[in-house]
Structures are given as structure tokens and as C-alpha cells.
Amino acid sequence: MACSSSATDAPTPGQSTATPEPTSAPGADPTSTPQTSPTATPEVVSEFDQRASRVMFDLFVDSYENDSGGVQIPALQQALEIQHPGLIPPLVEITRFALEEDQALALGDTLHQLTGESFAGDDFFSWHEWLGTQDETEILPGYANWKANLYSPFDSSFHQFLYNGVPTTIPLEGIQWGGVARDGIPPLENPRVIPGNRAAFLDLEELVFGVVINGEARAYPFRIMNSHEMANDVLGGVNVTLSYCTLCGSGILYQGMVNGQVETFGTSGFLYQSNKLMYDRTTNTLWQQQTGKPVVGDLVGSGIQLDQLPMTVTRWGAWFEEHPATTVLDLEQGFRRTYYHPDDARAIYFEYFHGDELLFPVWDQDTTLDAKTRVLGLRNGETARAYIAEQVIEAGVVNDDLAGLAVVVIGDENSQTVRAYRSGGRVFTGDETAGEVVDEAGVSWRITEDALLPTDTSLDALPRLTAQDVFWFGWTTFFPETELWLPVAAS
């Protein structure tokens, strides 16, 4: 799924979509041909750790190349003999591949004896959630290379992301394969666009991502972005990347610049906390989609964070009415895909968007709200707050203080938009005129993509705040200290 995967997008098992070849097969000795970072400091590895690492590399054999492949029961027996806690993460990982009943039973029994837990040997979801509850997880030497090897039948270039000694700010055992190769869900590169008045394929009620940069407006329909989840584009003379994690309902617009250089991004095929790990095309560093920070690879520790730009989730009809000169992505993007209406049962992710369940396990999930409740996430420094979109739309205007920052959050029922702006301490209410709010002094302010613009030209505009329109779990997983705004009950 770019954020994860779709069965229709996954490569045929065993098919490699990129080079180079892995340096070793899953059963290889990790101490003989490790793949390491050129700058990595050599590890001092105990004999006990070396033995466990060899067992780790013997746990799984590519079943597409070997009739006796899959989970290797003799290696499970060795794991029980040495009782090394560092074997637990790879054992949990291969619960995704316990293809035969005897393998699943043996794997479940091995994990039970090592952990005391009693999930089935093919229940990856439960085992991975359990792994996230552990205060300390021991990782064996060679684990990163082993993980890349495990998934190399689907794409051998995964070794460019995961290798021994790779710098990381997230736990390697928490990285999940999303079911596709690198760019298996292909990003759009300078997507084809048409004038809005030619977009007859769009219903007025359809959702789009709306963007305005330097006066140039563009709409990115959900029905197209659901199948690509990434668009590297230029709008208003600015290089941008629209990164959309379908799994967590999070579309974020980033400026496509790293270290002052133009950069484009792709979909790595991996996830962390059910959130897309995208990668840059220059260094192959993995970036967390939700935060815009490098988390695995050469740029970790660089202090770089992508600049987020304002973007609006809105209905096409309302967007086109407000921005009649807008362009919109063309239905023809050069791919053999049918971009079904999101409400069509044949549409990609239809069941996921219309159901309550998650496709991938999430550690420490906040259950205050249903996981897929749509919220607007807003931050000021270390303070984070979430506004339930439905409640903001119902209220129309929410005046709030976010750690000393006066804000106004505005919802619109017609367009289904939720936007946030600095309020400058003014108290706003809705205006009878569509697209405007009014302050306590009676001054009307026009709602735009960049700012609130006063009709009194002696006043300064109030800039829009970057916020995230996202599922509740997608926001709180990365900002766990989030406060939830709730409307004041009528007395």
C-alpha cells in the first residue's frame, strides 16, 4: 500500500524489481559477508551472540526457491536450545511466513517457550503488538541485514535501506514490510493535469487534496492518490511532494528540498506504526511520513526536517467554486489502472476505508476514540492537540489557545474542510457570508488557503497554520501526549 500494500500491486513472489542482488541469502552466515555502512564501527560480538545470529539466519529459507522452504523447524529447535532473547524479534517477524501447519505450530511453541505468551505461530498481528509492549528488546548482530534478506525475494534493493550498522532513530524490529516492492505503488512524477472545467469525471462531492502556492491552485483527487500515494510535483514554482499514507488517512504536503537541494521521494515498501516510510532518491534514507524526519539511513542525526506546507481536504465542487482557475490531475496518468470512485466497492482500499480494522499492528495505540476517527492535528512546540473534524464542522468556528498560541479552527459543512489559522487573540464567529468569519469587532475576514484576510485593510492578515487531517491513531501514535479538544457542554 505505499503506506502499505495492495494485493494487486504486490510483485509475484520471488520477482525482483531492482538491483543489486543481496550479499547473502537468508541462510548465510552473518559473520562472513555482512552488509554494513561504510562508516559503521565494527561490533564486538560475543560467541553467544554469534551462535544466535547463525541460528537467526537459518530460521527461514525462501520458500519460492526451495520446496522445503519457509520456517525451518530444526532452527527452531536450536533456538530453544540456546534461549537467546535476541531471537525473539526475528521469530516474531517470520510468523508472517508460517505457511504450513506444522511450521506454524512449531513456531508458536518456540515463541511460547521463549516468551511465556500463547499466540498462534501465524498470528503476526498479536505477536507484533506484544513485542511493542516490551520495555527492552535485544537485537542480534546482523539483524538489519537479515531483515533485508528476508524480503529480498520481493525486491533485492531493500538492502539499500536496511544493512548492518544503519543509523536509526526507530526500532528496527518495529519496521514492517507493507507487501510491495520499492515504488511498487508508483509515485506520480510531475503528474499530468487538466483545467478544472474539463474534469467531467469528478463528482462534485468527491474529496480532493487542494493546494494553492503563489496563486496557482491544483486539486489531487483521492481516487487517483489512493493508487499512488505520492506525487512529486512543481506548483507555483515550488518543488513539492504530496505524501499520502492511506493506512492512517494522512495526506501531507512537503516542500521538496533537502539541504537546499531539490529532492524527490518514493515509497520504500516499509512501514513503521502503520505509517509510510518514504525514501529520498539521493541517499536512500527512510523518512517518517507523519513527521517529515529522517529515521533510518545516512541523514539520521542531521537535524533535517522537511518543511510542511498548507493543504486542504475538501470536496471537488467547493474547491472548483472557490478556485475556478484550478488545475486537477488528469485521469490518464500513464498507468494501466482504473481510478474508481472512492465509493465504488471496486475502488482500492474501499473495505479498509469503510471498516474499523487496521491492516497492520500499531504499538501503544490510543483507544480514546475509534482508530479511524478523522481529526485535525495541530502542534505548537511540544504541545499537540487534536480536533475531531466532525465536531469542528458542526461548531463552524473554534477559538482556542494552544500553549500560548491563539488559534482559530474553522470547519465548513459544504466543503467538509477543517482549517486552522492564527487568531491574533481575536474571537471569531461564523458569518452569514459563505467563506468568511467575523471577529468580535464586527470585521469580516475572508477564508483563503494562505490566511484570513480582513476587509479592513488597516489590519494584518492572519496566516494559516500547518496542520494534519489524519486518522486519530495516525496522529496519536506519533504524538502520544496529544490533548483532545472537546466542545464545551451547554449549561
Image: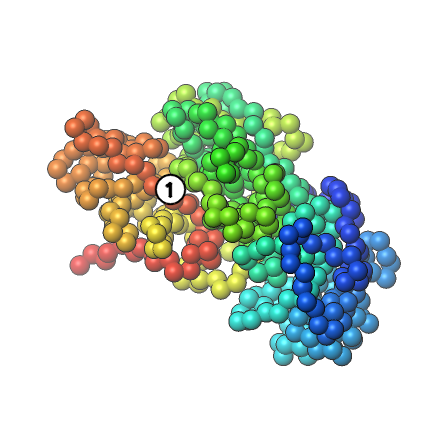
**Left/right of residue 266 with respect to residue 23 in the rendered view:** left
**Visible in this render: residue 349?**
no
> Which of these two is toward me, 11 or 342?
11
Please determine whether, in this image, residue 333 is positioned above or below residue 173. Answer: above
Q: Secondary structure at mark 1?
A: loop
Quadrant for residue 488, please give it.
Answer: bottom left
Q: Amino acid at mark 1?
A: Thr
Residue at 28 percent across and 54 percent down: it is 403
Residue at 77 percent across and 62 percent down: it is 31
Q: Position of residue 290 (x, y in %)?
A: 48, 48
Residue matched to label 1: 466
Please determine whether, in this image, residue 91 is positioned above or below residue 411. Answer: below
**Left/right of residue 127 with respect to residue 443 in the rendered view:** right
**Left/right of residue 131 with respect to residue 317 in the rendered view:** right
Quadrant for residue 432, please give it.
Answer: top left
Q: Position of residue 341 (x, y in %)?
A: 54, 36
Residue at 55 percent across and 35 percent down: it is 263
Crowd tier of the residue under label 1, counting other residues whose Cα lies within 10 Å: few below 14, some 14–19, many 20 or above: many
